[in-house]
Image (cartoon, helix red, strand yellow):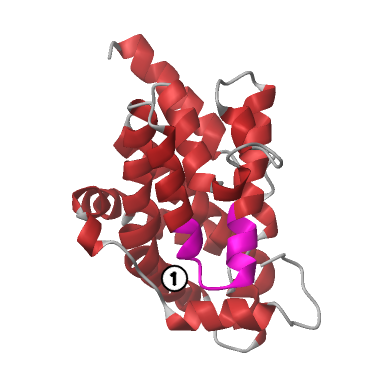
Amino acid sequence: MADAGRALALQRLLQLASPSLPVGAFAYSEGLEAAVEQGGLRSEADVRDWLAASLEATLVPLDLAVYFRLHAAWEAECVERVGRWSRYLLTSRETAERRAQERHLGHALATLLDGMHEPDAGDWRLGGVHAGAVSFAALWALAATRWHIESRMAASGLAWAWLENQVLAAVKLVPLGQTQGQQLLFDLAERVPGAVARAAELTDAELGGSLPGVALASTAHETLYSRLYRS
């Protein structure tokens, strides 16, 4: 890819990863809110450990590893394979909230991309032919391939978007100061390149990851008496 093409791809990725993207990712804490309420997360160090564990134990062997398969499937124009891996990601979510989050973000991104006249996005919108198999990663991969964003760069952006939203939630919930939040992002971002590289090398037999504590926090959040976040 020529320098101009790489520069444009980077701009497209920045737009895709921006918290201003109107998909509502800011509404989800993925169990973090319940963990704070239960007293498990009280400091910057607690949040760092929580997010580092989530990155290594779930994002690498599940979200990022599946993302590479979704990206390759869109590049091959194999919608059947996209649907299969997207359903795999959905069924790997341990709680009702996490599955609802995945579907909501996927439908929202599909609606946005359809509004931007991206081919195939409309079929994944709520009510579309592939709506039942929708996931956020599947639509992220669609945007990345259509916008000529290389797979590892796109996976890095997906990891960054997850990390930024989690840190923003922690800043509000623990609470943490803005400088502490930025330091968390700065420190944890160092782990992303290695995480992406490991995810890219995993075989199908090595896929799958779970953290029981995160799953239990997500379950507890479903009945939390007062909530700021939807998950």
Q: Compared with residue 93, is residue 126 higher up or lower down, i.e. above or below?
A: above
Residue range corresponding to the magenta coloring? 89-102
The amino acid marked with disc number 1 is Arg
Q: Is residue 93 magenta?
A: yes
Q: Residue 62 at x, y = what percent?
A: 36, 59
Q: Is residue 42 visible?
A: no
Looking at the image, which residue sits at the far right? 226
> Callout 1: few (<14), some (14-19), or many (20+) C-alpha neighbours within 10 Å?
many
Whether residue 229 sits left or right of residue 31 in the image: it is: right
Q: Quadrant of the C terminus?
A: bottom right
Whether residue 66 sits left or right of residue 160 in the image: it is: left
Question: Which residue is pictured at 64% across the width and 68% down the height?
Answer: 97
Whether residue 104 sits left or right of residue 205 in the image: it is: right
Comparing 50 with 212, the one in front is 212
Question: Which residue is pictured at 45% across the width and 76% down the height?
Answer: 45
Q: Is residue 224 visible?
A: yes
Comparing 134 with 63, the one in front is 134
Q: Compared with residue 194, is residue 171 higher up or lower down, i.e. above or below?
A: below
Identify the main secondary structure in magenta.
helix
Comparing 136 with 225, the one in front is 136
- The image quadrant that residue 99 belongs to is bottom right
Q: Which residue is mark 1?
A: 48
Q: Helix, strand, or loop for circle 1? A: helix
